[in-house]
Amino acid sequence: MSQLNDLPPDAHLDAQPCAALVELAQAVGTANLLCDDATRERHARSTAARPVLPLALVRPADALEVAAVTKIAARRRLPVYPISTGKNWGYGDGCAVGAGQLILDLSRMNRIIHVDPELAYAVIEPGVTQRQLSDYLLDRGIPLWADCTGAGPDTSYIGNIMERGFGHSPYGNRLQHVAGMQVVLASGELLETGFGHYAQSRTTHLFPYGVGPFLDGLFTQSNMGIVTRLGIWLMPQAECVNHFICSVPRHADIAPVVDALRPLRLDGTLRSILHIGNDMRVLSGGRVFPRDKVGTGSRLPEDMRTAMRAEAGVGAWSVSGALYGTAAQVAAARAALRKALRGTAARPRFITERSLRAGAFAARLLGTSGAGRRLRAKVALGASLFAMNRGVPNGRFLAGAYWRRRAGLPKGFPERADPARDGCGLLWVSPMLPLRGEDMLAVHALAQASFDKYGFDLFATFSMVNERTLGGVLTVAYDQDDPEETARARACHDEVFASMFDAGYIPYRVGNHAMARLDPQGDSYWRTVGALKAALDPAGILAPGRYQPEVARELG
């Protein structure tokens, strides 16, 4: 096994890990156990500027090989950190919580095992990406759409679902559209959830709860087991889809807009997840920080920000969503949306396939003029949004991750975009808040105070994840090549995280760098989680520190 000879001295290989690696190579094949410096360094890269060097990387081909790996790891007391495709941008990327862990890379397990066109679901493995499932449905003419996010075409469905992520469509609250998990436990035993443990079950991927205790949630945002397969529900193609965008000129005027939209979300008129982004989210969509025009500092001067907003034709806030159904249903939803927004500062503009074609034609007529360039940019954005609404992913929405990167957007962007590989600085605080305008403004004000203090532009998005809550994403974009700016970014993140926690706006999801902050009071919830972990993984070998605050503190 030649690669073992390539391990550098800082891997701290004593006899136990070395023997474990020999066994692992036998279990998955030498070619699928990677111990070289380049691989280990790649999986230490982080948008959080928190390099955590793993011991090695193992790439199993199926659930049985995953089980073999966990058995070896348990016997050898070797910590294992599972990833799907390693693209958990801003929350840990492809890194473990602590150094010296074995990365269990599930990307080779990329089979779309089954698609049922009649009952509208797919059974997939962790390596299946947004692009792969979308292409599968399109190439075979299957009239179904899969929800997708703006995280890029090469991200994993299961990886995002395990983090309880959300997308854009009526199926955007993804965990609610999952049934029947296959899980490898720390012992190496395979667990089928829901009805899946009954071999004769006909509804494993149709009814998630099964009979008896509902276990699926235990394996999301946890380190209780490794999900190697699940059923994901797909959306029947809608006869008609319209996208809408509202621009809100002034910051304070967004609160009445949120309150006007809430009843439409509650009564089902608005079925998709709506996204509300501030001007920085829009301005960073196709450009990077204008270093050549800003003398010092890491934020835009206010007059420049105002000018850029005017040039782009956007307000302080933009509201974006989609309407689905028959032509008559969409027409009724459009009318209800217009009526609800009367008296607010928002005026919805609707994007249809016809309007996109007309816009593209007008842009060609305008040529290279300023008006032509602006119109082409709007048409391109509209086309990307329209595609995402129909389950076709697009990497252009990763552009904001590159805002402070000195080299700007990489050549060929957005194809194969990889913010961690490209050295982007990105930290997220993701509070959950009531779906009320006053709460949204309160969260923004709390965050803005810290962003002003540390000298960063606040990127803010609030998404109507369900009918009663907004999921916030507050972004610190920073220059990883500047140590002083990196230190300020971390301090800003930590202060915002603490202020949200104290105000009762608890993050719904956290990065590896923040796991230790989840249990400031030592409450019974985390003690119960610890007891479950001890029962399912007594050796503590699965992802130590992942949603495990006490262990994360020890790992530093």
Image (cartoon, rainbow, N blue to C red):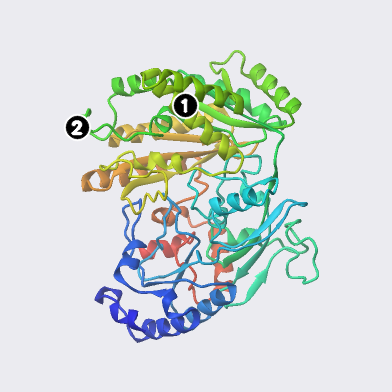
* Earlier sequence position, callout 2 versus callout 1: 2
For disc 2, the neighbor class at 10 Å (few under 14, some 14 to 19, many from 20) is few
Q: Which residue is mark 1?
A: 378
Label 2 – label 1 distance at C-alpha: 31 Å
Viewer-nearest residue: 456 or 393: 393
Seen in the picture, residue 420 relative to 69 is either above or below; the reply is above
The x and y percentages for residue 332 are 73, 23
Tell me the quadrant of the picture where the C terminus can be found.
bottom left
Q: Which residue is mark 2?
A: 296
Seen in the picture, residue 196 relative to 178 is either above or below; the reply is below
The kind of residue tagged 2 is Thr
Mark 2: secondary structure = loop
The x and y percentages for residue 240 are 69, 31
Viewer-nearest residue: 474 or 358: 358
Question: Is residue 160 shown to the viewer in this render?
Answer: yes
Q: Is residue 92 left or right of residue 290?
A: right
Tell me the quadrant of the picture where the N terminus can be found.
bottom left
The residue at the point 28 percent across, 32 percent down is 299
Q: Residue furthest left?
A: 295
The x and y percentages for residue 85 are 48, 59
